[in-house]
Image: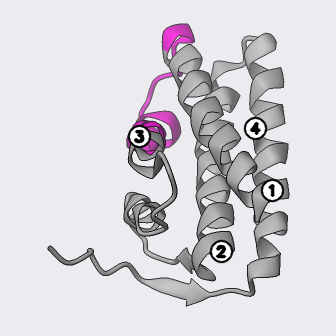
Amino acid sequence: MTSKSVRTKSEDRSLAKVYLAKARDNYEAMLSAFTQKNYNAVGTLAVQAVISSADAVCVSEKGLRSISQNHGDVCDLVLQTKLSDAKDRCNALKRVIAKKNVIQYEGRSVLAKEAEDLVKWTERFFLWVEQNVAAS
């Protein structure tokens, strides 16, 4: 079985730390927004945190990041890293990305339970990425 082709851009591996810093900023802001019960901000920041996290781990491991219009494609690129637990962690990534349209484009607010789930999934993915990028 061949891997799905994902539109990518080559990046210097040293930039992984920059993408990780962006991910950390969004992750920490998401946690603060959750504490303040600002659930719409939680949603937006969760999406940004996982996308920057995915960029960080892909740049660190492959020297590439996704430039696909479909944010779901980044999951395929993360899976290509062959890191331990990549498949399990991609489940959390996919869950957050799947909520992107609801969060940003539907005519309703993010619910408290949705925000709680987004925090949980984002944390699982971000902390895994942080551990792997810091180790490289």
Q: Would residue 130 appear left or right of 96 to someone viewing this image?
A: right
Crowd band around label 4 with a 10 angstrom C-alpha radius: few (<14), some (14–19), many (20+): many
> What distance separates the C-alpha of mark 1 from that of mark 3?
20 Å
| Disc nearest the viewer among 2 and 3 | 3
Q: Which residue is mark 1?
A: 134
SS of the residue at dot 3?
A: helix
> Is label 4 or label 1 in front?
1
In the rendered image, which quarter is residue 75 located in? bottom left
Tell me which residue sits at (77%, 24%) in the image: 31
Q: Residues within 10 Å of mark 3 (few under 14, many from 20)?
A: few
Q: Is residue 131 above or below residue 117?
A: below
| Residue position for label 2 | 59
Q: Which residue is mark 4?
A: 27
Task: Point out residue 60 in the picture as x, y percentages from the top left corner.
Answer: 68, 71
Q: Is residue 61 above or below residue 125?
A: below
Circle nearer the viewer, 1 or 2: 1
Mark 4, mark 3: which one is toward the viewer?
Answer: 3
In front: 3, or 43? 3
| Label 1 – label 2 distance at C-alpha | 13 Å
Between the C-alphas of marks 4 and 3, the distance is 20 Å
Instruction: Tell me which amino acid carries mark 1.
Output: Ala
Q: Is residue 99 magenta?
A: yes
14 relative position to 105: left or right? right
Queried whether the magenta region covers residue 30, the answer comes back as no
